[in-house]
Image (spheres, rainbow, N blue to C red):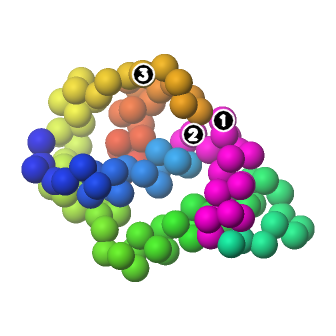
Amino acid sequence: MTDATHGMTLSAVSLPYYHFIMDAGLPKFARFATHVWGINPTGKSERELAEAGLSAMEAWMRELGVAMNLAELGVTEADLDDIVAATFIMNGGYKTLTKEDVRNVLKQCL
């Protein structure tokens, strides 16, 4: 739809998607925060760790200058129906999304 690279598209949708699925994989998101971003777990709940990890990831992405939302890639709300229709829904992962879930995440990505 936008001729954006796969990586830039992933960067534009990753943070809202990760926030959406975080509860389904909270222990792994907490581990990601400590093992990848070096967040000190002392005195923090799993949720606090997970949120801190995603905040660290966001800061790193901004430092790199990657696309932070779909609007930066030229996507508008009018494009969402086509994107949702073209999205493959697969089983597995932390949470299986519905088409409505995909639409909601994409709206947050604008």
Would residue 76 be visible to someone looking at this image?
A: yes
The amino acid type, in three-letter code, at marker 3 is: Met
User: Badge 1 local density, few (<14 within 10 Å), some, or many (20+)?
Assistant: few
- Percent x, y for residue 36? 62, 65
Residue that extends furthest to the bottom in the rendered view of this protein: 63
Q: In which quarter of the image is the N terminus?
A: top left
The amino acid type, in three-letter code, at marker 1 is: Ala
Residue that extends furthest to the front in the rendered view of this protein: 35
Depth order, front residue of 54/93: 93
30 vs 70, left or right, is: right
Looking at marks 2 and 3 on the same chain, the residue that comes earlier in the sequence is marked by 2
The amino acid type, in three-letter code, at marker 2 is: Ile
> SS at mark 3?
loop
Would residue 51 be visible to someone looking at this image?
A: no
> SS at mark 2?
helix
Task: Report the disc number at residue 90.
Answer: 3
